[in-house]
Image (cartoon, grey):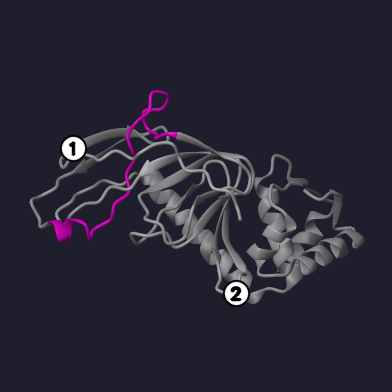
Amino acid sequence: MIPRIKPNFVLPRLPIKKVIHFDEWGNPMTVQLAISSAPRHLASSVVLPWTEIANDEEDPAAGPSLHFEQDCEIYGEGEEAVSYYRVISGVVRTCRFLADGRRQIDAFHVAGDVFGIETGAVRGLTAEAVSDCRIVAYRRMPLDKSGVATVSPQLVTHLLRSLGRAQEHAVLLGRRSAVEKVAAFLLDWARQSASACTIALAMTRLDIADYLGLTIETVSRTLSQLERDGVIELPSVRQIKIRDISALSALNG
């Protein structure tokens, strides 16, 4: 059973009517809330938009900074979605556990990425720390039907980026062979690495397999074949050196 760390903070109850000024990622923005006297059952049924939680002293735009050790659960599928998160350091995976015990990883989130934004009132996925990570929490604020809000353009950018990644992942899962999937994965992480020729992976090969919809044996065989073909080099389990970026790109299709 994966150990779980409960955040040691309580999300505050916000006033009914308030104007919040914040600078989410460097640009000043304003969220204006105008709550009417709508019946309670209407107010509780509306869960958008998303806005920041109470400020802390270090960063007036952010909520508490939380630390999670490797493989600890951040939140679970089916829980109430009262906040979303931004990764400060480390890597986070969002996934779903199927009825037969299998796991499908939806995405990996690195520093700067936002995760945990839901379209409904409960979590559709589980979030876990791939490595030791530090994240910042932001609060989801319920509004009634007369609620008005200006959503940060940075947040919209993150939502669109997540949508694009989801579309690419769907194509990767449904239309590619094993070698194409692995090549696409390596190229994606090479673009995010400090050196395009050396990839330092936080995740295990089982994580990679569950993300690509493959078995761990297939991932290991494919990496070994790419090494024999001179496309990559495997100095260690978590480090991959790309020796022929053109050949790897060709395999990506």
Q: Is residue 194 above or below residue 204?
A: above
> For numbered disc 2, what is the local secondary structure?
loop
Which is more toward the observer, 102 or 151?
A: 102
What's drawn in magenta, residue-wise? 40-64
- Residue 4 is left or right of residue 27, and the answer is right
Residue at 70%, 49% (x, y): give it: 190
Classify 10 Å Cα crowding around label 1: few (below 14), some (14-19), many (20 and above). few
> For numbered disc 1, what is the local secondary structure?
strand
Residue at 37%, 55% (x, y): give it: 80
Classify 10 Å Cα crowding around label 2: few (below 14), some (14-19), many (20 and above). few
Tell me which corner region of the image, top left, top right, bottom left or bottom right, holds residue 132. Answer: top right
- For the residues carrying marks 1 and 2, which lies nearer the camera in this image? 2
Residue wearing tag 1: 18
Residue 71: give x, y in percent of width and height.
62, 49
Count of residue discs = 2
Labels 1 and 2: the sequence-earlier one: 1
